[in-house]
Amino acid sequence: MNLTKRPKAVFWDIDGTLITTEGLHYEVIRDWCAARGYILTEAANDELLGKTMPEKWAILESRLPAGLTEEDFRADCARAYMAGLRAEMMRPGPVAAVRRLHELGVTQAAVSNGEAPVIEANLRALGLWDLMAFTVCGNDVPSGKPAPDPYLEAARRAGCAPDDCMAVEDSIVGVTSAAGGGLITLAWPEAVPGVQADMPGATLVVLEDSDFPWTLFEN
């Protein structure tokens, strides 16, 4: 993978990368399920991490009472999630990088397995909505991450070859998606003291904010 040429576009994952909301996602779905008689434990929630809302519903439906609908699940959870969003959930380093890349004239987009209204709410909470050329959500492609479809669609919309684009991700699911699409894949997980980040498939792993490859964009 070429790490000497300037990427023509940078695509950002949202949950965990720009904003730390995995806990909020869990609380929203946990509370929705509890109100309907199913206790979603943190261990059981591991199965839902990184999934699209339709994929989450497919997992949960058989555990819930009959008569509930995917439409209500998705709409109710979206409303509760957006009500719980707070700007202080941002990851300052990645958010600052988005703003700096915008100043440098780099095309940027958000690529997420989430629902379109939730993506917009996240970006507006972070003050980044107007800095994104477009967004790709889980409903825009046949298969969400870890399939490469979301990033291939982003490259298509940006008018670029996949290997001219950089993806920034925090998870194995996202890294697998971007690397599978042939993008320059930057893994930027949240630092956990004493834990070594293992991101197979990533072109570069960023452990400190200062590790971001600014030389690709500023020279």
Image (spheres, rainbow, N blue to C red):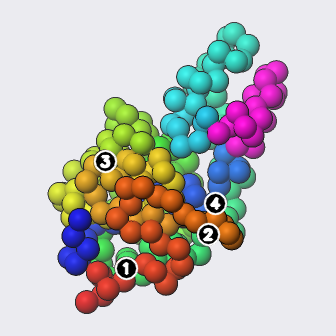
Relative image position of residue 191 (x, y in whole percent): 61, 69
Residue at the extreme top of the image, as rendered: 66
* Real-space CA distance between mark 3 and mark 1, rounded to the nearest whole angstrom: 21 Å
> Of the residues shown, which amino acid type is indicated by label 4?
Thr
Dot 4: element: loop
Q: Is residue 217 above or below residue 204?
A: below
Q: Residue at x 39, y 69 (%)?
A: 204
Disc on the earlier residue, 2 or 1: 2
> Of the residues shown, which amino acid type is indicated by label 1?
Pro
Dot 2: element: loop
Q: Disc 3, disc 1: CB below 8 Å? A: no
Of badges 4 and 2, nearer the viewer stands: 2
Kindly identify which numbered label has been placed on residue 102: none
Q: Residue at x 45, y 63 (%)?
A: 187
Kindly identify which numbered label has been placed on residue 213: 1
Kindly identify which numbered label has been placed on residue 20: 4
Kindly identify which numbered label has been placed on residue 180: 3
Relative image position of residue 215 (x, y in whole percent): 32, 86
Say how many tags the image has: 4
Occupied quadrant, residue 121: bottom right
Dot 3: element: helix
* Real-space CA distance between mark 4 and mark 2, rounded to the nearest whole angstrom: 12 Å
